[in-house]
Amino acid sequence: MTGNLTKAVRKQLVAWIGTGSKKFTLLYSITKDGCSPQTFHQKCDMKGATVTLLYNEQKSVFGGYASLPWFSIGGSHVRDDAAFLFQLRFSGVNRLNKFPVKPDNASGLYYGLDYGPTFGKGHDLLTFTNSPSSSNGIYALNGSMSASSYDMKGLGAEHINNGSMKCLELEVYKVEDIPQQWRKTSKWCKELEESLKSSVSSMRPARELKVSDFRLLLLGPVGSGKSSFCNTVTSVFQDRITQRAICGKAAHSITSVYHPYTIKVRSGGCLNFRLCDTRGLEEELGIDLIQCNHLLDGNLPEFFQFSADSGVDTNDSLFVQEPTLADKIHCVAFVLDGATLDELPQRVIDKMKDFRKLCTRKHIPQAVLLTKVDLIDDVVASSVNSVLESIDVGEKVQEAAELLGIPEYNIHPIKNYNTEVELDEGVNILALHALQQMLNYAEDFMENIQQREGKSLRNYEEYYMSESDVIEEKTGTL
């Protein structure tokens, strides 16, 4: 479930708890789970630290933090020195107050089988007992607020919750520590950057396959950063900011052709992979499932011009009727704008899910490039080296994984060069990490083909769905 916990409130709660970065997971919601003590205990008991938030009909937001887990036992007061009550909004206006438990107070929490989350003796915050009634989306919670075990700073209930426990929502979130880095990597430094560049430069397909380059296909919505990633990678290996791919803002995709970019190094040679840029996805325009199938299978020639209002003519002289393994795609990277991930139109999401399903049927590995991480977190904007310590970026990685059903270790946060005029070590390392993993996936794909082909290099055709299969699946007849 997803809840109403905003980024700003999450940061404030982390500051009040004061023990480092936290992850919040919604355990219980009265609008989704019903308002009963039994359901609350079923979902929240023995789950560790929790935060309870109440949203009343006067637009006030308040609640409590418990560092100890809840239990279904009858009438027991429990000491919790780290517990506190809080106020976030009052009558729609931000009002931030933390009310700590009084020193040496033995009644920070109250455990009751027939009670919802309850704080203090008396009680300072009793949310509800039994099963309160609801009408027209308003829950008449039969709880109360008072001052006993907590230092309420002289404020009464009328100054915190308007003296009303009629609520639109009550939520309980599990609160967990987040490691200093949500993804472990080697220490970032110039030596790591050079090591990654060397590793990427040395990767090439197995000679017996007679394939010169890995082909890495970039798919994603308009403006997500596909072309910018091509420029970022070429910048890394040219040791200067480059602009091979045309980028910018427009109503529709600036990229209109299938463009496999070769990557040159300063010495003049080319690396053994190509970044294949494509037209951006839109609700009505962009690549469709059949065009994607042709791309994956290697039927479309390099610099194929996508048409906004027509498909692919398989009788065209340029159409590759018998593509080889060298023509096919060996890894697909879905490119997503991390800053606007929750604004993606559902039809675009559905397209990407169809493409992902198609890739999976063809055994083609997939990754996600999560771009614009500097717009997700202000700290990352000032120093991209902090990206793996950012709670917000870590949560966006989880969100992207859930969106497309791709494991989190296949989600790679990156920042493309945009306003910079000089190279940045952190930007380079993020791009190289993502690129190295994509090449690893492509190498695994090739290895699987080698293992499966027993007689000749042309037997890999069994790996692929035919175009008719795609059409039949899309129409529900497969």
Image: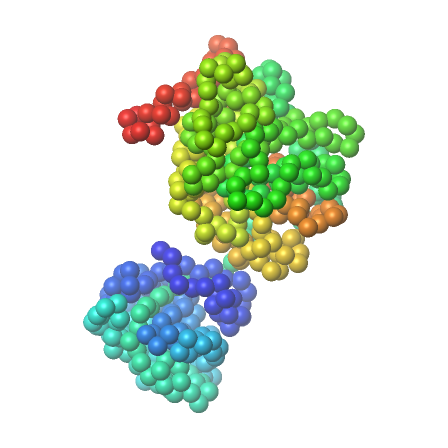
Residue 59 location (% of width, % of height): 37, 74
Residue 36 location (% of width, % of height): 24, 67
Please state if 68 lies on the left or on the right of 320 as rendered.
left
Quarter holding residue 35: bottom left
Please state if 376 lies on the left or on the right of 109 as rendered.
right
Please state if 474 lies on the left or on the right of 213 as rendered.
left
Residue 295 location (% of width, % of height): 50, 26
- Residue at the spot x=53%, y=34% of the render? 279
Q: Please name whichever residue, 286 or 451, is drawn nearer the observer in this view of the structure.
A: 286
* 146 over 380 or under it: above or below: below
| Residue that sits furthest to the right in the current view | 267
Q: Is residue 370 visible?
A: no
- Residue at the spot x=42%, y=78% of the render? 90
Number of callouts: 0
* 126 over 33 or under it: above or below: below
Quadrant occupied by the N terminus: bottom left
- Color scheme of the displayed model: rainbow
- Residue at the spot x=54%, y=39% of the render? 253
- Residue at the spot x=60%, y=19% of the render? 211
Q: Is residue 122 visible?
A: yes
| Residue that sits furthest to the top in the current view | 455
| Residue that sits furthest to the bottom in the current view | 154
Residue 277 location (% of width, % of height): 58, 33
Quadrant occupied by the C terminus: top left
Q: Please name whichever residue, 289 or 354, is drawn nearer the observer in this view of the structure.
A: 289
* 240 over 379 or under it: above or below: above
